[in-house]
Image (tube, coloured by chain):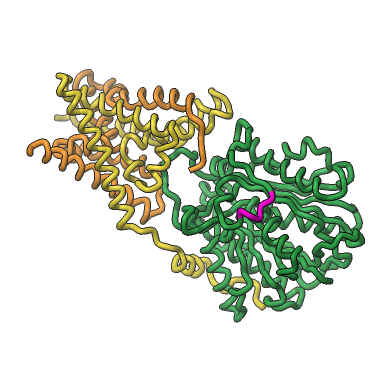
Amino acid sequence: MNSNVNMSNQEYSDFVDTKAKKSNLGKNILLAFVVGGIICSIGQIISDIAMNYGVAKQDATCITTIVLIFLGAFLTALNLYAKIGKFAGAGSIVPITGFSNSIVAPAIEFKTEGYILGLGANMFKVAGPVLVYGITTSVIVGFVYWLIKLFI
Amino acid sequence: MEIFMIYLKVFLTGGIICSIGQILIDKTKLTPARILVIFVTLGTILTAIGIYGPIVEFGAAGATVPISGFGYCLANGVMKEVDAIGFLGIFIGGVKGAAAGIASAVVFGFIASLIAKPTIK
Amino acid sequence: MKIGKQSIKLENTPKLLNTSSIVGPKEMQGPLAMYFEAHTDDIFFGEKSFEKAESKLMKTCINNLLGKVPTDNANIDYIFAGDLLNQCISSGYCIRDLNIPFFGLYGACSTFCESLMLASLFIDAGYATKTVAATSSHFCSAERQFRMPLEHGNQMSTTAQCTVTGSGAAIVVPKDISIQSPYITHVTPGKIVDMGIKDIANMGAAMAPAAFNTIATHLTDTGRRSDYYDAIITGDLGTLGSEVLVDLFSKEGVDISTNHYDCGAMIYDLENQDVKCGGSGCGCMASVFSSYFYEQLKTKKMNRVLIVATGALMSPLACQQGETIPSIAHAVAIENEV
């Protein structure tokens, strides 16, 4: 018997793809849509309540961000966010609560390696790149904007 | 009725942005960390070229709550600061605009991790 | 004696005297719950970290095993053990307290067969009179090392598998010990096979060609047909990998669909437990073979089995550098009659 698989790597990869169970894209998108929509609506409620108390629109957005980040951290600490994420997918990853979750999750887990090199160093294990690329892009944007302003 | 329309817009905008994320996850095998990076970078760029602003006008929290809204804060912050103080604003504005998000994430994250214990999903 | 390309016939046919298994809470919700010898409901197992918990799993398992055989620690000549964690710390810290000479092994999820193979070869060659083979894995310590933090809200890919929290151990002795037990007759160490799969959420597909290679080589070397065995048991190919393996054999005109079992596909309730393609990890084959299949051999419901543990020799670091997933499988033939 031939003990080597009689296929090229590409053929094998295609063969495996025909076997792999496809994820239910329609259902996943619907869940992401609904959960994402709900989280954003909660954000709007927080912002509306703040503005009702006479807070300026800019500050209301700030308050919304802070409250949502708190909620994300709180639900993660209660071990609930991972459960939501399991069915909501991007619906709970993309909102700012997901950013908060991605900071708290490694922090909880790496606490066993100490507060400095464990919790402290690993807190941004997942969310760190968001800040790296977000802030870098903002500096580029700022620079280009500054250049344009120079010449106009 | 008006309030219903506002919330409908919020829900739709937020839902659509998250759905795009889901399509990327399912179709391209991008990991969540990459999705977040793509969204925040796109949010920043789209704000700078004046596309994300109108989306925020339309969808309010539906556009600011997703992580692309974080990019919106970064871009708006940096442009405002450049207007105000010029060149130095390039380095100050972005983080200033997103400061609330960053500081609260660090602090709440720290506190939450002090009290929590990981469990199996 | 070496036979064929890479198999070894164990002429003194060592005996697999006894086995022991232990699993975590999720495995106890699966269909094999009644067969496991011990379990814990606490994923921390009373320890402060998952790594310590895994170590304790293996230690408890080995202690249970040694409690079942008429011997004490001092009589164990060598122990062969391994796990998935960096530097094999579960095994190392477990065996630290046992005071037994130790061979630390790494073959990813194939380690159980690798350790059982070496333990048998030592007995066969007469270098030892009692050897122990053990492996362990823990869902949480593996997630930490290989994937995302546990509390991160992400979705599992449909091809993913779930690391088994558990450990299994076996004791091998020369055949002149009078207690009736199955014999280890042949072993086939595997070669590394890499078919270019890069998706770390699809280990089953990466490992299936390695399993195919080792099983096919074993059958050729020993001159046996696949239906010689009551069961060809793979470690953790999962449902997808198993399907691929059966297909690869049918392409060669060999039907193994009736006597192929996969520990990863058996350990969980695939319908209700949300484990996608099934279980994986060093503890998967270790706990399932040491409980269910050993029981089948003891009660003679199965008389000839070939166990083939499969391992994906990757690390997150190598994958981030764009490497593919090299895989390996080791086979051990265990029979009631020689």
- Place of residue C14 in the rendered image (x, y in percent of width and height, measured from the top left): 85, 61
In the image, residue B36 lies in the stretch drawn in magenta: no
- Colour in which chain C is shown? green
Q: Does C246 appear above or below B24?
A: below
- Residue bounds of the magenta highlight: C33-37
Q: Does A115 appear above or below C149?
A: above
Taking the image as shown, residue B93 lies to the left or right of residue C237, namely left
Q: Does C250 appear above or below C42?
A: below
- Colour in which chain A is shown? yellow
Note whether residue C136 is visible: no
Q: Quadrant of residue C185?
A: bottom right
> Could you say which is closer to the camera, residue A143 or residue C263?
C263
Taking the image as shown, residue C8 lies to the left or right of residue C178, namely left
Quarter of the image containing the N terminus of chain A? bottom right
Note whether residue C41 is visible: yes
Chain that is orange in the image: B
Residue at 59 percent across and 66 percent down: it is C209
Residue at 37 percent across and 51 percent down: it is B25
Main SS category, magenta section: helix
- Place of residue C40 in the rendered image (x, y in percent of width and height, measured from the top left): 62, 42
Residue at 14 percent across and 36 percent down: it is B57
Q: Quadrant of residue C242?
A: bottom right
- Place of residue B45 in the rendered image (x, y in percent of width and height, measured from the top left): 26, 38
Taking the image as shown, residue C165 lies to the left or right of residue C333, namely left
Residue at 40 percent across and 46 percent down: it is A86
Quarter of the image containing the C terminus of chain A? top left
Q: Residue furthest bottom?
A: C253
